[in-house]
Amino acid sequence: MEELRTVARPYASAVFDIASNKETLDEWSAFLKKSSELLDQKDIRTLIKTPGLNKKTIAEIFFELSVDESESAENKALFSNFLNVLSENKRLNIITMVSSQFEQKKQKAEQVSEVILSSAAALPEEDIEEIKQALSKKLGKKIELNNSVDETLIGGAVIKIGDHMIDGSVRSQLKKMTRFLTN
């Protein structure tokens, strides 16, 4: 996994530089996400690994399946070139990692923090907005919040921001209490 990250890094940086200069971050983001979703399909993974198959043909198939018809001719050419380079270098399997690294760079450039909020029960929309505003004020960034229900929490919530976690769950509090009482 670490090797894939290392291999993907220069591709992600190059794509990000191109997208930044052309002001097409959203278009590249959508293209990379769609391309990486193709790798979830068994037939596509098999196609990539097929020995002797023309690499340009594989890139063209990938292109046809991942490019939106509404894209500009310039974007289509750039997307096609990107896929051809990956295919020629036998690197189509790293698109998911390239997409992930691209998104990190995009969020940093746009000053957006991705926050994962897991709560024991569904939260009202007003509470979610209040949490977003408080985090935005605290972090000084826009917040992209992904909310999910985790019934194993018993009560409360857990907030993950990058490598940081705020654990306000009842489960966590019970564990702390148990450790305190047993020591």
Image: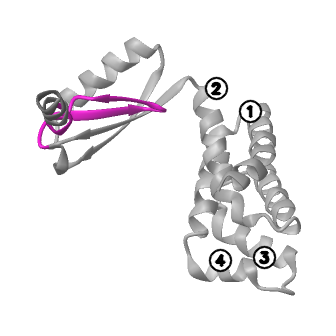
From this view, report whether residue 75 is shown above or below residue 69. Answer: above
From this view, report whether residue 115 is shown above or below residue 2. Answer: above
**Do residues under tags 1 and 3 come within 8 Å of each other at their CB atoms?**
no
Residue 169 position in % (x across, y down): 19, 34
Which is in the foreground here, disc 4 or disc 3?
4
Which image quarter is the C terminus in? Answer: top left
In this view, the residue in front, 168 or 115, is: 168
In this view, the residue in front, 158 or 42, is: 158
For numbered disc 4, what is the local secondary structure?
helix
**Do residues under tags 2 and 1 come within 8 Å of each other at their CB atoms?**
yes
Residue 10 position in % (x across, y down): 81, 44
Compute the Cα span from label 2 to label 3.
32 Å
Say the numbered circle drawn on residue 58: 3
Residue at 73% x, 75% y is 61
Residue topped by disc 4: 45
Compute the Cα span from label 1 to label 4.
30 Å
Range of magenta residues: 154-173
Q: What amino acid is at disc 1?
A: Ser
The disc, 2 or 3, on the residue closer to the chain's N-terminal end is 3
Compute the Cα span from label 4 to label 2.
32 Å
Residue topped by disc 2: 109
Compute the Cα span from label 1 to label 3.
27 Å
Q: What amino acid is at disc 3?
A: Ile
The disc, 2 or 1, on the residue closer to the chain's N-terminal end is 1
- In the visual, does 83 lie left or right of 29? right
Please tell me how crowded label 3 is: few (under 14), some (14-19), or many (20+) other residues with Cα within 10 Å: some
**Do residues under tags 2 and 3 come within 8 Å of each other at their CB atoms?**
no
Q: What amino acid is at disc 4?
A: Arg
Residue at 67% x, 62% y is 67
